[in-house]
Amino acid sequence: MSNEDLQRQPDRTDIERTQQLLGDRYELNWIIGRGGMSTVWLAWDTQTERDVAVKILKPEYTDNPEFRTRFRNESHAAARLHSENVVETYDYGEVQNGGTVFCFIIMEYVRGESLADVLTRERVLPEALALDVLVQAALGLKAIHEAGMVHRDIKPGNLLITSDGVVKVTDFGIAKAAEAVPLTRTGMVVGTAQYVSPEQAQGQSVGPASD
């Protein structure tokens, strides 16, 4: 978890409100990541007795029924996907909260760091390590593509590396579902500008090769 995330932890009232919406099974600990579409918490699964990552999607996405349908379908498909090189998806849920929808996904908690963090620290990777990361990421993408999905947002921040060197692809499904939401605010894009494929940037159809 970055120093910025540590400094931006919510107050007790916000934690209690989020916990109430989430229910009793997953006990929230603290925020471990923030993105343009979601906030990720570390939580304890009281049924399986293991740490999990809880991704809570922002209201501007979950208020859109088409987005929820697409993302729900992607999450259910991801839950059937099992690969050492893809972060496991365990569960998906929606809760009506007044006029909005509280939408979350439960995922494997990966003890390690992102490739982006590694590159920030090391600047340049040894050739053997770079090739190993590429091969493992390709195996993860192969599993995703064989399941009929396209990631659409492959970048160093979405490649997690465990303490024993296993590379895991994370965050697939969200960019595809986000096409259902009109994004008008500055900086809100489907995918990440520095890494997006040309066909995706032009709004054309994408396939496995786009990743």
Image (spheres, rainbow, N blue to C red):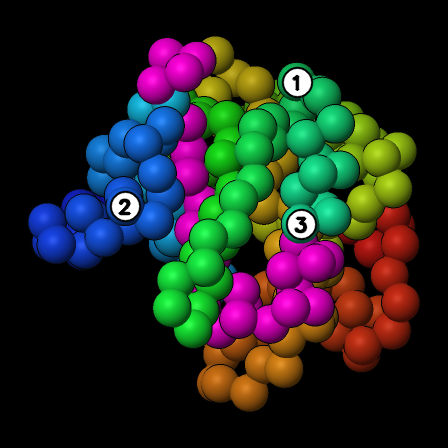
Mark 1, residue position: 84
103 sits to left or right of 113: right
Residue 164's place in the image compared with 157, above or below, is above
State which mark lies toward you, 3 or 1: 3
Residue 123 in view (yes/no) = no
Q: Position of residue 35 (x, y in %)?
A: 43, 58
Q: Does 66 appear in magenta?
A: yes
> What secondary structure is marked by label 2?
helix
Going from N to C along the chain, the mark reached first, 3 or 1, is: 3
| Mark 3–mark 1 distance (CA, rounded to whole Å) | 23 Å
208 sits to left or right of 134: right
Front residue of 151/64: it is 64
Front residue of 38/201: it is 38
Going from N to C along the chain, the mark reached first, 2 or 1, is: 2
Mark 2, residue position: 20
Within-10-Å neighbours for mark 3: few <14, some 14–19, many 20+: many
State which mark lies toward you, 3 or 2: 2
Mark 3, residue position: 72
What is the magenta range? Answer: 46-71
Callouts 3 and 2 close, C-beta under 8 Å: no
